Amino acid sequence: MKTTMSIALLTSLLALSPAAHANFSVNVGAINVNPDNSSSTINEAPTLGLKGDSDTQLGITIDYAFNDQWVLELIAATPFSHDVNGTGGLAGNKIADIKQLPPSLIAQYHFLDTSYALRPFVGVGINYTMFFDEQPSQALKTTLGTDNVKVKLDDSFGFVAQIGANYKIDENWGLHAMVSIMDIDTDATVYANGAKALTSTVELDPVVAMFGVKYNF
């Protein structure tokens, strides 16, 4: 919902500001989030851990160009869904299903000048990841001996590093590709019968890749 509202607001600003249209572009395509899961041990049981799988969704990025080199990009997408699977002593068991949205704001520097069709760029920015709709698995309920189980992942704030390129087909249409590394750390807590049963600090740190179509206003 928050991502949809952000896109709607920026779209409205475009419609109300004809003179600024040339500064805006929209990229639409497939975006994949592939968690790294490098440090996911459960605090109460160091030999156990959590691991999230990858997911691909519809990605939308909105760019505002301050000049030929500097661009501000907002990354949005439809919600990502992940199976959280066990590692170590929990290997082979799905712990929960979760959903997340990682909207990000990136400052990009574009190389070469606008006469080149292919222009690479680099970027750095900030990311805020919202976790929601966490659903515990039946395997977790069985392990804890109760159906009254809840899983909660805290929202995350971190940095983003990005590389990519745009290819100009004509004055309006082009192609957009980027790869970003996001710093996403979250505290996962499992509650059984209202009491805290397990906690885990999970470093997802995903690689986010997107390929899509670009439209310049």
Image: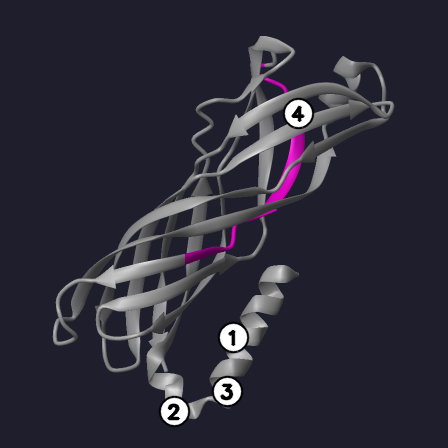
Q: Residue at x 72, y 31 (%)?
A: 151
Q: How far across and down, in percent of the image, does residue 63 sit?
A: 38, 69
How far apart are labels 1 and 4 at the CA level? Answer: 38 Å
Q: Quadrant of the C terminus?
A: bottom left
Q: Residues within 10 Å of mark 1 (few under 14, many from 20)?
A: some
Q: Is residue 192 left or right of residue 206?
A: right
Q: Which residue matches tag 2?
A: 19
| Kind of residue at disc 3 | Ala
How far apart are labels 4 and 3 at the CA level? Answer: 45 Å
| Kind of residue at disc 4 | Ile
Tally of marks: 4
Q: Is residue 32 above or below residue 105?
A: above
Looking at the image, do the residues carrying marks 1 and 3 touch, with CB atoms under 8 Å apart?
no
Q: How far across and down, in percent of the image, does residue 161 sit?
A: 33, 46
How far apart are labels 2 and 3 at the CA level? Answer: 10 Å
| Kind of residue at disc 2 | Ala
Q: Is residue 89 visible?
A: no
Looking at the image, do the residues carrying marks 1 and 4 touch, with CB atoms under 8 Å apart?
no
Q: Quadrant of residue 135?
A: top right
Span of residues in magenta: 91-105
Secondary structure of the residue carrying tag 2 is helix
Q: Which residue matches tag 3?
A: 15
Q: How far across and down, in percent of the image, does residue 51 sit?
A: 53, 26
Q: Earlier in the sequence, mark 4 or mark 2?
A: 2
Q: Is residue 176 left or right of residue 196?
A: left
Q: Which residue matches tag 4?
A: 95
